[in-house]
Amino acid sequence: MDKPKKILIIDDDEGIVWVVKKALEPLGYNVVSRSRLASGLRAVQDLPQVVLLDLMLPDGDGLEGLREIRSVHPDAAVIMITAHARMQSTITAMKEGAYDYIEKPFDIEELKIVIEKVFRDLSMRAELKELKKTAFESEYPQMIGKTPGMLKVFKDIGKVASKDVTVLITGESGTGKELVAKAVHFNSSRSVGPFVAINAASIPGNLLESELFGYQKGAFTGATRDKKGKIEAANGGTLFLDEISEMEPELQAKLLRFLQDREFSLIGSNEVKKADVRIMGATNKNLTSSVLKGQFREDLYYRFNVVQIKLPPLRERKEDIPLLSKNFLREAISKLETGEKELAKEAKDALQKYDWPGNVRELENVIKRACILSSGSVIEKKDLLLDEDSSLSVKEFLEDKLRRYLKDMTQMTNFNLYDTVIGEVERALIAIVLKETGGNQLKTAKILGINRNTLRTKIREYKIR
Protein backbone atom coordinates (compact mmCIF):
# COMPACT_ATOMS: atom_id res chain seq x y z
CA MET A 1 0.00 0.00 0.00
CA ASP A 2 1.41 3.38 -1.04
CA LYS A 3 2.12 5.96 1.63
CA PRO A 4 -0.58 8.73 1.74
CA LYS A 5 0.55 11.94 0.06
CA LYS A 6 0.01 14.52 2.81
CA ILE A 7 0.10 18.28 2.17
CA LEU A 8 -0.15 20.92 4.90
CA ILE A 9 -1.17 24.49 4.03
CA ILE A 10 -0.29 27.21 6.56
CA ASP A 11 -2.06 30.33 5.23
CA ASP A 12 -4.69 32.70 6.64
CA ASP A 13 -6.15 33.42 3.16
CA GLU A 14 -9.29 31.26 3.08
CA GLY A 15 -9.67 31.76 -0.67
CA ILE A 16 -6.19 30.35 -1.38
CA VAL A 17 -6.83 27.38 0.91
CA TRP A 18 -10.16 26.63 -0.80
CA VAL A 19 -8.63 26.80 -4.30
CA VAL A 20 -5.67 24.56 -3.37
CA LYS A 21 -7.90 21.93 -1.74
CA LYS A 22 -10.33 21.96 -4.68
CA ALA A 23 -7.43 21.47 -7.14
CA LEU A 24 -5.39 18.86 -5.28
CA GLU A 25 -7.82 16.66 -3.33
CA PRO A 26 -9.40 15.12 -6.49
CA LEU A 27 -5.86 14.05 -7.50
CA GLY A 28 -5.53 11.90 -4.38
CA TYR A 29 -3.63 14.30 -2.14
CA ASN A 30 -4.57 14.48 1.56
CA VAL A 31 -4.71 18.25 2.20
CA VAL A 32 -5.07 19.85 5.65
CA SER A 33 -4.84 23.53 6.49
CA ARG A 34 -4.04 25.84 9.38
CA SER A 35 -4.53 29.61 9.45
CA ARG A 36 -1.94 30.40 12.13
CA LEU A 37 1.79 29.68 12.32
CA ALA A 38 1.58 28.21 15.84
CA SER A 39 -1.15 25.70 14.94
CA GLY A 40 0.60 24.99 11.64
CA LEU A 41 3.85 24.08 13.44
CA ARG A 42 1.89 21.72 15.69
CA ALA A 43 0.40 20.08 12.57
CA VAL A 44 3.93 19.48 11.25
CA GLN A 45 4.19 16.79 13.98
CA ASP A 46 1.93 14.64 11.74
CA LEU A 47 4.84 14.59 9.22
CA PRO A 48 3.32 15.92 5.98
CA GLN A 49 5.62 15.41 2.98
CA VAL A 50 4.89 18.90 1.61
CA VAL A 51 4.18 22.18 3.41
CA LEU A 52 2.78 25.25 1.62
CA LEU A 53 3.83 28.10 3.92
CA ASP A 54 2.75 31.73 3.67
CA LEU A 55 5.55 34.24 4.19
CA MET A 56 3.40 36.63 6.28
CA LEU A 57 1.06 35.20 8.91
CA PRO A 58 -0.96 36.93 11.64
CA ASP A 59 1.07 35.43 14.48
CA GLY A 60 4.53 35.14 12.99
CA ASP A 61 7.10 35.31 10.23
CA GLY A 62 7.02 32.55 7.61
CA LEU A 63 10.82 32.46 7.44
CA GLU A 64 10.99 31.72 11.16
CA GLY A 65 8.39 29.02 10.56
CA LEU A 66 10.56 27.59 7.77
CA ARG A 67 13.52 27.31 10.13
CA GLU A 68 11.37 25.57 12.74
CA ILE A 69 9.95 23.11 10.22
CA ARG A 70 13.44 22.32 8.89
CA SER A 71 14.54 21.66 12.46
CA VAL A 72 11.71 19.32 13.52
CA HIS A 73 10.94 17.70 10.14
CA PRO A 74 13.97 18.08 7.83
CA ASP A 75 12.56 15.63 5.24
CA ALA A 76 9.57 17.88 4.46
CA ALA A 77 9.59 19.91 1.23
CA VAL A 78 8.54 23.48 2.13
CA ILE A 79 7.15 25.72 -0.62
CA MET A 80 6.94 29.40 0.37
CA ILE A 81 3.94 31.38 -0.94
CA THR A 82 3.46 35.14 -0.71
CA ALA A 83 1.76 38.12 -2.24
CA HIS A 84 4.80 40.29 -1.48
CA ALA A 85 7.78 38.71 -3.23
CA ARG A 86 11.06 40.47 -2.61
CA MET A 87 14.51 39.51 -3.78
CA GLN A 88 16.00 39.26 -0.29
CA SER A 89 13.18 37.18 1.18
CA THR A 90 13.38 34.84 -1.82
CA ILE A 91 17.13 34.42 -1.40
CA THR A 92 16.79 33.92 2.35
CA ALA A 93 14.03 31.33 1.94
CA MET A 94 16.10 29.28 -0.49
CA LYS A 95 19.19 29.56 1.72
CA GLU A 96 17.16 28.32 4.68
CA GLY A 97 16.19 25.19 2.76
CA ALA A 98 12.87 26.00 1.03
CA TYR A 99 12.10 23.65 -1.86
CA ASP A 100 10.55 26.41 -3.97
CA TYR A 101 9.01 29.88 -3.79
CA ILE A 102 5.84 30.94 -5.61
CA GLU A 103 4.02 34.25 -5.75
CA LYS A 104 0.29 34.95 -5.32
CA PRO A 105 -1.84 34.88 -7.33
CA PHE A 106 -0.44 31.67 -8.76
CA ASP A 107 -1.66 29.58 -11.68
CA ILE A 108 -3.34 26.48 -10.25
CA GLU A 109 -2.07 24.33 -13.12
CA GLU A 110 1.45 25.50 -12.36
CA LEU A 111 0.93 24.58 -8.70
CA LYS A 112 -0.18 21.06 -9.72
CA ILE A 113 3.02 20.67 -11.76
CA VAL A 114 5.17 21.87 -8.83
CA ILE A 115 3.42 19.51 -6.36
CA GLU A 116 3.78 16.58 -8.75
CA LYS A 117 7.48 17.37 -9.14
CA VAL A 118 7.95 17.60 -5.36
CA PHE A 119 6.52 14.13 -4.74
CA ARG A 120 8.53 12.71 -7.64
CA ASP A 121 11.70 14.20 -6.15
CA LEU A 122 10.81 12.93 -2.67
CA SER A 123 10.26 9.44 -4.07
CA MET A 124 13.62 9.50 -5.87
CA ARG A 125 15.31 10.82 -2.73
CA ALA A 126 13.81 7.97 -0.67
CA GLU A 127 14.97 5.41 -3.25
CA LEU A 128 18.46 6.90 -3.32
CA LYS A 129 18.57 6.91 0.47
CA GLU A 130 17.58 3.24 0.54
CA LEU A 131 20.13 2.34 -2.13
CA LYS A 132 22.91 4.16 -0.24
CA LYS A 133 21.88 2.48 2.99
CA THR A 134 21.90 -0.94 1.29
CA ALA A 135 25.32 -0.20 -0.23
CA PHE A 136 26.59 0.90 3.18
CA GLU A 137 25.30 -2.27 4.84
CA SER A 138 26.83 -4.53 2.18
CA GLU A 139 30.14 -2.70 1.77
CA TYR A 140 31.02 -1.93 5.37
CA PRO A 141 31.12 -4.26 8.40
CA GLN A 142 28.20 -3.57 10.69
CA MET A 143 28.27 -2.66 14.34
CA ILE A 144 27.16 -5.74 16.23
CA GLY A 145 26.49 -6.08 19.92
CA LYS A 146 23.98 -6.76 22.64
CA THR A 147 25.94 -5.62 25.68
CA PRO A 148 24.63 -2.57 27.59
CA GLY A 149 27.52 -0.42 26.35
CA MET A 150 26.75 -1.12 22.68
CA LEU A 151 23.00 -0.80 23.14
CA LYS A 152 23.64 2.68 24.52
CA VAL A 153 25.73 3.50 21.42
CA PHE A 154 22.87 2.34 19.16
CA LYS A 155 20.38 4.44 21.13
CA ASP A 156 22.66 7.49 20.95
CA ILE A 157 22.97 7.09 17.17
CA GLY A 158 19.18 6.93 16.89
CA LYS A 159 18.74 10.04 19.02
CA VAL A 160 21.33 12.18 17.25
CA ALA A 161 20.85 11.08 13.60
CA SER A 162 17.87 13.34 12.93
CA LYS A 163 19.36 16.30 14.80
CA ASP A 164 21.70 18.27 12.54
CA VAL A 165 24.30 18.92 15.24
CA THR A 166 28.04 18.39 15.56
CA VAL A 167 28.96 15.02 17.08
CA LEU A 168 32.11 13.91 18.90
CA ILE A 169 32.85 10.16 18.79
CA THR A 170 35.37 8.87 21.33
CA GLY A 171 36.96 5.50 21.91
CA GLU A 172 40.19 3.57 21.54
CA SER A 173 41.70 2.82 18.14
CA GLY A 174 39.89 -0.01 16.39
CA THR A 175 36.56 0.35 18.22
CA GLY A 176 34.69 1.46 15.07
CA LYS A 177 34.38 5.25 15.34
CA GLU A 178 34.02 5.75 11.59
CA LEU A 179 31.25 3.14 11.51
CA VAL A 180 29.34 5.21 14.09
CA ALA A 181 29.76 8.32 11.93
CA LYS A 182 28.49 6.45 8.86
CA ALA A 183 25.53 5.08 10.79
CA VAL A 184 24.58 8.60 11.92
CA HIS A 185 24.95 9.92 8.36
CA PHE A 186 22.94 7.16 6.64
CA ASN A 187 20.11 7.48 9.16
CA SER A 188 19.89 11.28 8.80
CA SER A 189 18.24 13.60 6.30
CA ARG A 190 21.72 14.11 4.79
CA SER A 191 21.97 10.46 3.70
CA VAL A 192 21.42 11.39 0.03
CA GLY A 193 24.48 13.66 0.26
CA PRO A 194 28.13 12.57 0.36
CA PHE A 195 29.95 11.06 3.32
CA VAL A 196 33.56 12.27 3.29
CA ALA A 197 36.18 11.08 5.78
CA ILE A 198 39.66 12.38 6.51
CA ASN A 199 42.19 11.20 9.12
CA ALA A 200 44.10 14.12 10.63
CA ALA A 201 46.79 11.82 12.01
CA SER A 202 47.66 10.32 8.62
CA ILE A 203 48.31 13.63 6.82
CA PRO A 204 51.25 15.94 7.64
CA GLY A 205 50.14 19.17 9.32
CA ASN A 206 51.27 21.39 6.45
CA LEU A 207 49.16 19.40 3.97
CA LEU A 208 46.05 18.90 6.10
CA GLU A 209 44.84 22.47 5.63
CA SER A 210 44.89 22.19 1.83
CA GLU A 211 43.16 18.79 2.05
CA LEU A 212 40.36 20.29 4.13
CA PHE A 213 39.87 23.67 2.47
CA GLY A 214 41.33 23.15 -1.01
CA TYR A 215 43.61 25.55 -2.85
CA GLN A 216 43.71 27.87 -5.84
CA LYS A 217 46.08 27.42 -8.74
CA GLY A 218 49.40 29.14 -7.98
CA ALA A 219 48.78 29.26 -4.21
CA PHE A 220 52.12 27.50 -3.62
CA THR A 221 54.78 25.60 -5.53
CA GLY A 222 53.18 22.58 -7.14
CA ALA A 223 49.64 24.03 -7.14
CA THR A 224 49.18 23.70 -10.91
CA ARG A 225 45.39 23.70 -10.78
CA ASP A 226 42.49 24.53 -8.47
CA LYS A 227 41.73 21.73 -6.04
CA LYS A 228 38.47 21.22 -4.17
CA GLY A 229 38.90 20.45 -0.47
CA LYS A 230 37.08 17.86 1.64
CA ILE A 231 34.74 20.48 3.09
CA GLU A 232 33.50 21.49 -0.34
CA ALA A 233 33.32 17.85 -1.44
CA ALA A 234 31.06 17.10 1.54
CA ASN A 235 28.59 19.92 0.74
CA GLY A 236 25.04 18.72 1.45
CA GLY A 237 26.35 15.76 3.42
CA THR A 238 28.68 14.85 6.27
CA LEU A 239 32.40 15.40 6.90
CA PHE A 240 34.02 12.98 9.36
CA LEU A 241 37.27 14.23 10.89
CA ASP A 242 39.14 11.36 12.53
CA GLU A 243 41.80 12.02 15.20
CA ILE A 244 40.97 15.73 15.53
CA SER A 245 43.38 16.00 18.47
CA GLU A 246 46.27 15.80 15.97
CA MET A 247 45.41 19.10 14.25
CA GLU A 248 47.87 21.99 14.45
CA PRO A 249 46.68 25.04 16.48
CA GLU A 250 46.48 27.29 13.37
CA LEU A 251 44.27 24.77 11.60
CA GLN A 252 42.11 24.39 14.71
CA ALA A 253 41.41 28.14 14.58
CA LYS A 254 40.48 27.99 10.89
CA LEU A 255 38.18 25.01 11.45
CA LEU A 256 36.51 26.84 14.34
CA ARG A 257 35.71 29.78 12.03
CA PHE A 258 34.11 27.39 9.57
CA LEU A 259 32.01 25.75 12.29
CA GLN A 260 30.81 29.19 13.40
CA ASP A 261 29.99 30.72 9.99
CA ARG A 262 29.95 27.77 7.55
CA GLU A 263 32.23 29.90 5.36
CA PHE A 264 35.73 29.19 4.05
CA SER A 265 38.22 30.20 1.38
CA LEU A 266 40.54 28.15 -0.78
CA ILE A 267 44.21 28.61 0.11
CA GLY A 268 45.50 31.44 -2.07
CA SER A 269 42.04 32.93 -2.66
CA ASN A 270 40.09 35.78 -1.07
CA GLU A 271 36.75 34.49 -2.36
CA VAL A 272 34.49 33.39 0.50
CA LYS A 273 32.53 30.20 -0.10
CA LYS A 274 29.73 28.59 1.91
CA ALA A 275 29.22 24.88 2.55
CA ASP A 276 26.27 23.11 4.15
CA VAL A 277 28.14 20.35 5.94
CA ARG A 278 27.50 18.38 9.11
CA ILE A 279 30.77 17.88 10.97
CA MET A 280 31.53 14.80 13.06
CA GLY A 281 34.85 14.42 14.85
CA ALA A 282 36.56 11.47 16.51
CA THR A 283 39.49 10.96 18.84
CA ASN A 284 41.12 8.17 20.84
CA LYS A 285 42.57 10.70 23.27
CA ASN A 286 41.13 12.49 26.28
CA LEU A 287 40.30 15.88 24.73
CA THR A 288 39.63 17.44 28.13
CA SER A 289 43.22 16.64 29.09
CA SER A 290 44.45 18.01 25.74
CA VAL A 291 42.58 21.26 26.44
CA LEU A 292 44.14 21.58 29.90
CA LYS A 293 47.59 21.03 28.39
CA GLY A 294 46.95 23.72 25.76
CA GLN A 295 47.14 21.22 22.90
CA PHE A 296 43.50 21.62 21.81
CA ARG A 297 41.45 24.81 21.73
CA GLU A 298 38.80 24.96 24.43
CA ASP A 299 36.30 26.81 22.20
CA LEU A 300 36.74 24.20 19.44
CA TYR A 301 36.29 21.42 21.99
CA TYR A 302 32.91 22.83 23.02
CA ARG A 303 31.92 23.24 19.36
CA PHE A 304 32.62 19.55 18.77
CA ASN A 305 31.27 18.26 22.04
CA VAL A 306 27.61 19.17 21.45
CA VAL A 307 26.79 15.46 21.56
CA GLN A 308 29.32 12.77 22.48
CA ILE A 309 29.06 9.08 21.60
CA LYS A 310 31.54 6.91 23.49
CA LEU A 311 32.48 3.48 22.15
CA PRO A 312 33.51 0.84 24.71
CA PRO A 313 36.68 -1.20 24.07
CA LEU A 314 36.19 -4.85 23.10
CA ARG A 315 37.65 -6.10 26.41
CA GLU A 316 34.65 -4.45 28.16
CA ARG A 317 32.09 -6.16 25.91
CA LYS A 318 33.44 -9.70 25.64
CA GLU A 319 29.90 -11.11 25.44
CA ASP A 320 29.82 -9.67 21.91
CA ILE A 321 32.91 -11.60 20.74
CA PRO A 322 30.98 -14.74 19.59
CA LEU A 323 28.56 -12.58 17.55
CA LEU A 324 31.36 -10.52 16.03
CA SER A 325 33.49 -13.60 15.29
CA LYS A 326 30.61 -15.31 13.52
CA ASN A 327 29.92 -12.22 11.43
CA PHE A 328 33.59 -11.66 10.48
CA LEU A 329 33.99 -15.36 9.65
CA ARG A 330 30.97 -15.27 7.34
CA GLU A 331 32.31 -12.14 5.59
CA ALA A 332 35.82 -13.60 5.23
CA ILE A 333 34.51 -16.87 3.74
CA SER A 334 32.47 -14.90 1.20
CA LYS A 335 35.12 -12.35 0.21
CA LEU A 336 38.16 -14.65 0.28
CA GLU A 337 36.29 -17.64 -1.23
CA THR A 338 37.97 -20.05 1.20
CA GLY A 339 35.14 -22.54 1.40
CA GLU A 340 33.15 -23.24 4.55
CA LYS A 341 35.04 -22.78 7.81
CA GLU A 342 34.14 -23.03 11.47
CA LEU A 343 35.89 -22.17 14.71
CA ALA A 344 36.99 -25.01 16.97
CA LYS A 345 35.92 -24.78 20.62
CA GLU A 346 39.53 -24.12 21.71
CA ALA A 347 39.74 -21.28 19.17
CA LYS A 348 36.50 -19.75 20.47
CA ASP A 349 37.80 -20.00 24.04
CA ALA A 350 41.08 -18.32 23.03
CA LEU A 351 39.19 -15.46 21.36
CA GLN A 352 37.15 -15.02 24.55
CA LYS A 353 40.22 -14.98 26.84
CA TYR A 354 42.33 -12.61 24.74
CA ASP A 355 42.43 -8.95 25.83
CA TRP A 356 42.13 -7.36 22.32
CA PRO A 357 44.35 -4.26 22.55
CA GLY A 358 43.48 -3.55 18.89
CA ASN A 359 39.74 -3.94 19.61
CA VAL A 360 37.18 -4.93 16.94
CA ARG A 361 39.58 -4.15 14.08
CA GLU A 362 42.12 -6.62 15.51
CA LEU A 363 39.44 -9.30 15.90
CA GLU A 364 38.37 -8.86 12.28
CA ASN A 365 41.97 -9.16 11.06
CA VAL A 366 42.65 -12.22 13.23
CA ILE A 367 39.59 -14.02 11.82
CA LYS A 368 40.48 -13.05 8.24
CA ARG A 369 44.08 -14.24 8.66
CA ALA A 370 42.98 -17.51 10.29
CA CYS A 371 40.60 -18.14 7.38
CA ILE A 372 43.54 -17.96 4.98
CA LEU A 373 46.06 -19.89 7.11
CA SER A 374 43.86 -22.76 8.29
CA SER A 375 44.32 -25.84 6.11
CA GLY A 376 41.05 -27.60 6.78
CA SER A 377 37.46 -26.62 7.36
CA VAL A 378 38.05 -26.10 11.08
CA ILE A 379 40.00 -23.10 12.40
CA GLU A 380 42.14 -24.30 15.29
CA LYS A 381 43.54 -22.22 18.14
CA LYS A 382 47.02 -22.26 16.56
CA ASP A 383 45.61 -20.70 13.36
CA LEU A 384 44.66 -17.55 15.27
CA LEU A 385 48.30 -16.61 15.95
CA LEU A 386 47.32 -14.62 19.02
CA ASP A 387 49.90 -13.02 21.29
CA GLU A 388 48.47 -14.62 24.37
CA ASP A 389 50.57 -12.79 26.97
CA SER A 390 47.55 -10.71 27.95
CA SER A 391 45.42 -13.80 28.52
CA LEU A 392 47.96 -15.57 30.75
CA SER A 393 47.99 -15.48 34.52
CA VAL A 394 50.77 -13.42 36.18
CA LYS A 395 52.52 -16.69 37.12
CA GLU A 396 52.36 -18.04 33.55
CA PHE A 397 53.42 -14.69 32.10
CA LEU A 398 56.51 -14.40 34.33
CA GLU A 399 57.49 -18.04 33.84
CA ASP A 400 57.30 -17.66 30.08
CA LYS A 401 59.32 -14.43 30.02
CA LEU A 402 61.92 -15.73 32.50
CA ARG A 403 62.32 -18.98 30.57
CA ARG A 404 63.29 -17.02 27.47
CA TYR A 405 65.58 -14.67 29.41
CA LEU A 406 67.35 -17.42 31.43
CA LYS A 407 67.95 -19.77 28.50
CA ASP A 408 71.67 -19.00 28.35
CA MET A 409 72.13 -17.60 31.86
CA THR A 410 72.54 -21.01 33.54
CA GLN A 411 75.84 -21.45 31.73
CA MET A 412 77.28 -18.37 33.41
CA THR A 413 79.18 -18.40 36.71
CA ASN A 414 79.74 -15.67 39.27
CA PHE A 415 76.50 -14.00 38.21
CA ASN A 416 74.12 -12.82 40.94
CA LEU A 417 71.06 -14.02 39.04
CA TYR A 418 68.53 -13.92 41.89
CA ASP A 419 69.18 -10.33 42.99
CA THR A 420 69.43 -9.10 39.38
CA VAL A 421 66.09 -10.61 38.27
CA ILE A 422 64.17 -9.69 41.44
CA GLY A 423 65.54 -6.14 41.35
CA GLU A 424 64.69 -5.58 37.68
CA VAL A 425 61.15 -6.98 38.06
CA GLU A 426 60.53 -4.86 41.19
CA ARG A 427 61.95 -1.71 39.57
CA ALA A 428 59.89 -2.17 36.39
CA LEU A 429 56.69 -2.89 38.35
CA ILE A 430 57.02 0.22 40.53
CA ALA A 431 57.93 2.46 37.56
CA ILE A 432 54.95 1.25 35.51
CA VAL A 433 52.38 1.72 38.32
CA LEU A 434 53.82 5.15 39.18
CA LYS A 435 53.43 6.22 35.56
CA GLU A 436 49.84 4.92 35.42
CA THR A 437 48.91 6.90 38.55
CA GLY A 438 50.58 10.07 37.30
CA GLY A 439 53.24 9.91 40.03
CA ASN A 440 50.73 9.64 42.89
CA GLN A 441 52.73 7.71 45.54
CA LEU A 442 49.79 7.10 47.88
CA LYS A 443 47.74 5.54 45.07
CA THR A 444 50.75 3.60 43.78
CA ALA A 445 51.44 2.13 47.23
CA LYS A 446 47.78 1.12 47.55
CA ILE A 447 47.78 -0.64 44.16
CA LEU A 448 51.06 -2.43 44.91
CA GLY A 449 49.88 -3.37 48.39
CA ILE A 450 52.92 -1.98 50.16
CA ASN A 451 53.58 0.71 52.77
CA ARG A 452 54.08 4.26 51.44
CA ASN A 453 57.44 4.56 53.29
CA THR A 454 58.56 1.28 51.69
CA LEU A 455 57.61 2.69 48.30
CA ARG A 456 59.65 5.86 48.91
CA THR A 457 62.67 3.75 49.91
CA LYS A 458 62.35 1.65 46.74
CA ILE A 459 62.03 4.76 44.55
CA ARG A 460 65.29 6.14 46.01
CA GLU A 461 67.00 2.76 45.82
CA TYR A 462 66.12 2.20 42.14
CA LYS A 463 66.53 5.90 41.22
CA ILE A 464 63.03 5.96 39.69
CA ARG A 465 61.97 9.36 38.37
Image (cartoon, helix red, strand yellow):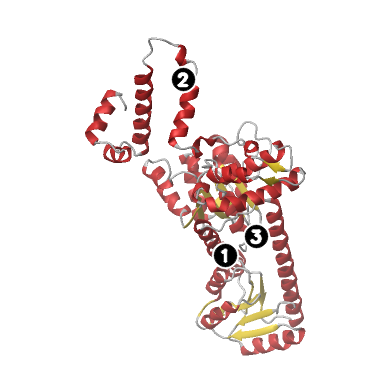
Question: Which disc number belongs to residue 162?
Answer: 1
**Distance of label 2 from label 1 (alpha carbons):** 61 Å
Q: Dot 3 surroundings within 10 Å: few (below 14), some, or many (20 or more)?
A: many
Q: Position of residue 408 (x, y in %)?
A: 49, 15
Name the mark nearer the viewer: 3 or 2: 2
Residue type indicated by callout 2: Leu
Q: How many marks?
A: 3
- Local secondary structure at mark 3: loop
Instruction: Please give the name of the residue rendered at 66% of the width and 75% of the height, measured from the top-left corner.
Output: 49
Instruction: Please give the name of the residue rendered at 49% of the width and 28% of the height, measured from the top-left corner.
Output: 400
**Distance of label 3 from label 2 (alpha carbons):** 60 Å
> Please, is residue 162 above or below residue 266 in the view?
below
**Distance of label 1 from label 3 (alpha carbons):** 11 Å
Q: Dot 1 surroundings within 10 Å: few (below 14), some, or many (20 or more)?
A: some
The C terminus appears in which quarter of the rendering?
A: top left
Quarter of the figure with residue 339: top right
Question: Which disc number belongs to residue 191?
Answer: 3
Instruction: Please give the name of the residue rendered at 75% of the width and 43% of the height, measured from the top-left corner.
Output: 336
> Front-most of 219 and 351?
351
> Front-most of 332 and 306?
332
Residue type indicated by callout 1: Ser
> Front-most of 143 and 295?
143
Residue type indicated by callout 3: Ser
Q: Name the residue that disc number 2 marks.
A: 406
Name the mark nearer the viewer: 2 or 1: 2
Q: Position of residue 313 (x, y in %)?
A: 51, 48
- Mark 1 or mark 3, which has the lower sequence index? 1
User: Farthest residue toward the left?
Assistant: 453
- Mark 3 or mark 2, which has the lower sequence index? 3
The N terminus appears in which quarter of the rendering?
A: bottom right
